[in-house]
Amino acid sequence: MFAQAPTPTSALTEAEKVRRISQNDDFLIYSLILVGVLVAAAVVFYFLERWRRSNPKGETEREAGMSLSSFREMYENGEITEGEYQRLKEKMASKIKGAPAQATPPPPPEGGGQTPPQPPSPG
């Protein structure tokens, strides 16, 4: 009926002392394992983030793809000409490859522009 009062430490048997010490050691071991796992995860995340930031080509390709699709929409809607679309497309391709963009001459204006001289016809 009455609860037993805790026994003082001096009255513990040798076996109980060993059991309490081993329980404390188990707690310490499990705590160290948990800390080790957390540190390892932090190191993995650090290197993943560092790798992700050092990959600018992936960003360039993604940006170029988005820009190219918007340029294609502009071309299909008639907002830009085919020549402008081709120049933008070449510029994006060179940007992805890392080479400097080559300047291409603009196409001749449609209708009413100067036409290149024609060679004389035999006859």
Image (tube, rainbow, N blue to C red):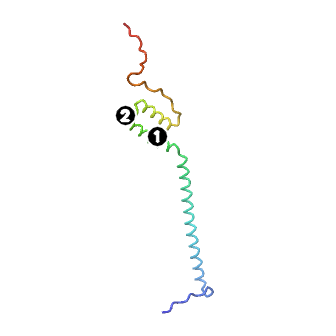
Instruction: Tell me which numbered mark, 1 or 2, is placed earlier along the sequence.
Output: 1
Question: Where is residue 110 drawn, in percent x and y?
Answer: 39, 25
In this view, the residue in front, 115 or 63, is 115
Quarter occupied by the C terminus: top left
Amino acid at pointer 1: Ala
User: Which of the numbered marks, if any, corresponds to residue 13?
Assistant: none
Q: Nearer the viewer, mark 1 or mark 2?
A: 2
The residue most toward the right is 10
The residue most toward the front is 112
Q: Vertically, is 68 above or below 35?
A: above
In this view, the residue in front, 97 or 7, is 97
Left or right side of 17 for 62: left
Q: Which residue is rendered at x = 57% and y = 65% of the image? A: 35
Q: Which residue is rendered at x = 55% and y = 66% of the image? A: 34
The secondary element bearing badge 1 is classed as: helix
**Circle 1 Cα neighbour tier, 10 Å, few/some/many (<14 / 14–19 / ≥20):** some
User: Which of the numbered marks, if any, corresponds to residue 78?
Assistant: 2
Question: Where is residue 120 drawn, in percent x and y?
Answer: 40, 10
Amino acid at pointer 2: Gly
The secondary element bearing badge 2 is classed as: loop
Q: Which residue is rendered at x = 50% and y = 29% of the image? A: 103
Mark 1, residue position? 64
Left or right side of 61 for 35: right
Left or right side of 56 for 67: left
Question: Where is residue 87 drawn, in percent x and y?
Answer: 45, 31
